[in-house]
Amino acid sequence: MGEGAPPGMSVMDLLAAVRDADERHRIFAERLEDPLAYEVEHAFHFSAKDNLCTSDFQARAGSRILEGYRPPFDATAVARLRQAGGLLIGKTNMDEFGFGSFSTNSATGVPRNPYDAARSCGGSSGGAAAAASMLEGHLAVGVSTGGSISCPASFCGVVGLTPTYGRVSRWGLIDYGNSLDKIGLLSASSGMIRRYLPAISGPDPLDPTSQVQPPLDMSGQIRSVAVPEEALTGLSGSMRAAFEDAVARLERMGVEVRRGAMPALRFALSAYYILATAEASTNLARYCGMRYGDIEQETDQSFNEFFSRVRSRGLGREAKRRILLGTFCRMVGFRDRYYIKALQVRELIIREYEEQFRSVDAVLTPTMPFVAPRFDEIENMSALEAYQADFLTGPPNLAGLPHISIPCAYIDGLPAGMQLVAPRWEEGRLLSLAERWENGFEYRRPEGRA
């Protein structure tokens, strides 16, 4: 039996557990089917979000336009986990190209929440969070652009760490927004993340953004936190009460809590969606029916007809909306009004975090304004209402800062998370507090966990 299998579970039982969890919760876009693969020596098992390239599975990023694309290489993060003894058991479902907060914009399957199958797992790393929640001893590799690790971690009751931008190589990632995307980890507790974050971190000559970084320091403590008043607006009543209870518990642990203001946070979401969609619209231009996935065979067309046909057929509604929004923001006459202004807001947010870090070790907020919504509730949301769900997770992603979501409450049986944001390169202090928190707060696991 491989070392990554839970104690007392045979190799075949592990394979059956993965299959059962997938059938009940639609976790995987593709998963390992061959039981012989489990006979290889491995220390743990892990999954990769579907927008990470792997040589043994398709990489579709949740999109029909990439159907059939099988990369000939592994993303750096995947390759490093394999080198650390990990066995890749599958690619997890996600919103198409990361466009969403609920993993409902997917052409490969909509994952269902482990605590209630009628509810969302969060997005866009919904399948990753569900895998971390459902499978014993599992490590899920997720990707965050504006909260795509923290959000599903909160909804699925797991720990989700988003490292500093540049800490983990993005080589082999199918990008959403190049200046925003970060590869991170989700697990049922912080222990596995502490163990394997060093494996995926560090410079990579294939990714220039990873080259200038200090060594990963897994020490550090959080003795004081700031709670900005702007983060407490727009919360459901039950979420606000749960968060205040968590703050009180932190104070009993000896953590100093300071209340204050970060006014620029009010503008973060608007800036994020301008910058993210602007970058996405350029990134998605490469999917034109000539290179990857869905290839257009009829070549006797004009360029516009050729590209429009495959993109109309292969891209989902949300992807098209973000292409249009991002292209609009970069148009002559609108670039200064929207794109340049968003960059200025981004700089303001970075400065406000830096100002907070002069007097506290981290900034504390709820992770999401509510618990996992039902799918029928999501269907009745407007696009703007869905975007507004990210108002707490957008700011640290916009600033490129490390942050972690940890379970802090259970509201009517559904998990809720709190989010801690630390200065650049201080992932260690986030994990240290997460481990202290776990010593005094009992995490509940979903029924039927494998």
Image (tube, rainbow, N blue to C red):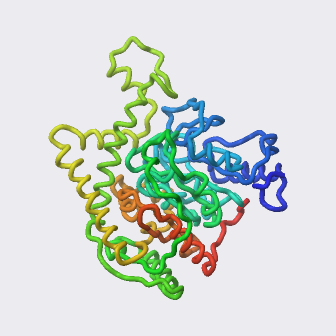
Q: Residue at x 53, y 51 (%)?
A: 202
Between residue 40 and residue 12, name the one nearer to us: 40
Residue 151 position, x and y percent, is: 48, 61
Q: Residue furthest bottom?
A: 252
Indicate the quadrant where residue 395 lies. bottom left
Q: Residue at x 30, y 66 (%)?
A: 265
Q: Residue at x 48, y 32 (%)?
A: 65
- Can residue 286 be spotted in the picture? yes
Relative to residue 267, is residue 259 drawn left or right?
right
Relative to residue 224, is residue 59 drawn left or right?
right
Indicate the quadrant where residue 281 lies. top left
Residue 5 position, x and y percent, is: 78, 56
Relative to residue 386, is residue 217 drawn left or right?
right
Residue 143 position, x and y percent, is: 50, 51
Between residue 248 and residue 13, name the one nearer to us: 248
Between residue 45 and residue 328, name the one nearer to us: 45
